[in-house]
Each structure stands twice: as C-alpha cells, then as structure tokens.
Amino acid sequence: MRRKNNLKELKDRNKKLILKTLINKGALSRTEISQYTGLSLTAVSDLTDELIEENIIKENGVGTSTGGRRPIMLQFNPESGYILVVKVDENKIIASLFDFSMNKISQKEIKFDYFEISKLEAKIKECYFSFEKEICKDDKKIFGIGICLNNDVKILKPRGILNTSISSEFITIEQSLSLELGLTVVEEDELNLKAMAEYQNLNMRENLAYIKIDEDIESSVIIKGKRLETSINIGQMIVDKNGPTLDEVVSIKSIIKRALIMIIEEHEKEQIDNIPPINIDSLCEILNDEKKNRLINEVSNYLKVAIINLKNLLDIKVFIFDGKILKLSAIINSLARSCENLVIKNPSTKDEDVMREAAKLTLKKIINIQEA
C-alpha cells in the first residue's frame, strides 16, 4: 500500500514539474519538456497524456522541425479556468481576469479610497462575483485570486472578517477570502511583482535590484530568476566613511532638506522668510542650474556607493529606480554614466505586466509548485 502511495506521490510531483516548466517556458514539445525536466521521454508522454485528459493542458499546433517530423507543441489549456488579480491603487481597484495561459480576458475598475480599508475585502468579493456572473460559463470557473498591495495599503494592515464573527484582528484578507470562497488566494507586495515583471520583460537573465525611493527606501532583489526572500534594508546601508545611511542622504525628505540648506546659504538672513515652500515637484524650478547639478551629483555619488556594494555582494547587474526620486530627471543618466557595465534605468512595466506576475504566482500555488 505504501509503495502505491509513493508511486502516486512521484507521479503527482512529476506532473507538477511539467506544469511548472510550461508556466515558465511557454509552449513546448514533449522532447523539450523532457530536456528541461530531466524526465524520460516515455514518462513525459504518459504524464502529458493524462494532463490532456484532465483538460489542464492541450496540444497547440506544431513546432519547428530539427530534421525529423515537426513536433506537436503543448501548453496550458487557457480554457481550464481563470485567475482574478486585484491591484489596489490609491483611488481605485483594478481587477483583471487572466486565463491559464496568462492572457488577460477582461478588466474592470471600481472606486476605492484608502479610508475605506475596512471595506477592501467586500470590494474584492464584489469583483469576484461580478466576473463569475459575467464571464464564467458552463464548467469554467475562477480558481484563485491574486492581490497586489502597495506599501501605502500594507501600512494600514487590511484585515479580513469572517461570517463566523472571528475578530478581524486575527485574520488576514488572504486567509478570509480563501476560507469563504474556497479558493487559492495569494497576497503579494506590488514592489516584488514589479521587480519580477521587469526581470521577465528585460529577458537579460542578470540579477536585478528594483529600488523605490520616496520618503522611505524600499527594494526587491531578483537572483537567478527568483526573488530574494531574505530582507535587504538598503536604506540602512552605510554610504560614507562618516557614517550616514542611504536613508539619511537620498530619501526624498533628505533631498529636500539638502536643497533647503543650499537655498538658505545664498540668502541674507532677512530674506529667509520669503523662501517659497519646497517639495520634490517644485525643487528643480526653485534651484538654479548650479545648485541643481550639485544636488544631483551628491545624490548620484551616494547611490553609486550603494550600487557598487550590491553589485559586489550579490552580483547584481541591473538596477531599476522608481519613486519620487525620478522627479530629479537627470539622476538616472548621471548614474548610468558613472557606473560602467551595469544597466541602470527607469521602470518600463505596465499595470498589466505586474498583474500578470501576480496571476503566475497564484497559478503556481494552485498547482502546489514548490520552487527549487
């Protein structure tokens, strides 16, 4: 009996390995699946036949011949079901429905305000039931929900509320939705999803750091295609021999403080009261060219130290900068010029790219894929 259980566990594990490969690589032939997974071609043929019978994958045309018969390509069956992804923005919720091939089927937006955080779970369920009624027909259904939260929402600590009257202080929205709807639910930080989306879109396969600089500094690091689970607080990195951290010299509040000092230095004491209010949007208009260039050079030099440290520590070759720091429009070009052999750029991903990454994570959890 134990032997039968072991064989079943092995078969299930190998099926999941095949599904994982199709998620990561797209449509493949049986021979290509065998090469990527290390499974024998016979095992791949048997297992993929079962997955086709289960309607999870399907044959999708023929591929390019390498000398013999053109191979039949296999892919996830887009009609197997759907994944709902909900992205929470500051004034709206974007809800998109993806099929199992990661094609966006439908999208809608509903109004939402951060002050309505207690209603977030209800809003997500509203999206779910709306799609279920409009899109899901016959045997098609929504198998999971991916939730994309930015840091502003996470700070508010949204909680779930069960009909059983369990206190909302003791359950997350992820747990509550999963229990109430009977679905796989995955909650992920928007920053991590953006980092993965940038990694996929660049298709360079170099280690990547996604750094967002606002009032605080956040980061997400991708190593060999996987997000680094160990937290790296880049903001606490020492970037000068005298001891200031990156937070203390390049966060937005630090940049504005430095700009204000520059302005005060050139004014007579009695003129200080006439200095206009300064924020990151007005900074470049208030500063003259000399001070603007000096400020950008100072910020660039500190960021360069952090970049070199991360490159040496984790072999990171690609750096994506996001956030209010980009209001200093010359900062990226300044960094790119001073850091040779590295890619330093603005983010290029769209909301759909980010939400697709959330859909992928949810699909992987649905089929219980454990990353190697």
Image (spheres, rainbow, N blue to C red):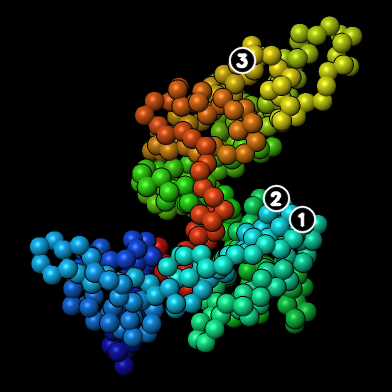
Give the answer, above or below, for where 23 lies relative to 164: above
Give coordinates of residue 332: x percent, y percent. 52, 29
Give the answer, above or below, for where 3 lies relative to 349: below
Q: Residue at x 50, y 39 (%)?
A: 320
Give coordinates of residue 204: x percent, y percent. 36, 44
Give the SS element for disc 2: helix
Give the Cα separation between the discs numbered 3 and 2: 31 Å
In the image, is 54 to the left or to the right of 65?
right
Q: Which residue position is annotated with label 1?
A: 114
Give the answer, above or below, for where 159 lies relative to 10: above
Q: Amino acid at mark 2?
A: Asp
Q: Which residue position is annotated with label 3?
A: 294
State the count of labels.
Answer: 3
Give the Cα separation between the discs numbered 3 and 1: 38 Å
Q: Of callouts 3 and 2, which one flags the residue occurring earlier in the amino acid sequence? A: 2
243 or 136: nearer the eye? 136
Q: Specify the quadrant of the image occupied by residue 293.
A: top right
Give the SS element for disc 1: helix
Q: Which residue position is annotated with label 2?
A: 152
Q: Of callouts 3 and 1, which one flags the residue occurring earlier in the amino acid sequence? A: 1
- The image quadrant where one finds the N terminus is bottom left
* Residue 187 appears in the figure: yes
Crowd rating for badge 1 (residues with CA inside 10 Å; few <14, some 14–19, many 20+): some
Q: Specify the quadrant of the image occupied by residue 108.
A: bottom right
Q: Residue at x 37, y 84 (%)?
A: 54
Give the Cα separation between the discs numbered 2 and 1: 8 Å
Q: Amino acid at mark 1?
A: Tyr
Q: Of callouts 2 and 1, which one flags the residue occurring earlier in the amino acid sequence? A: 1
Q: Specify the quadrant of the image occupied by residue 271.
A: top right
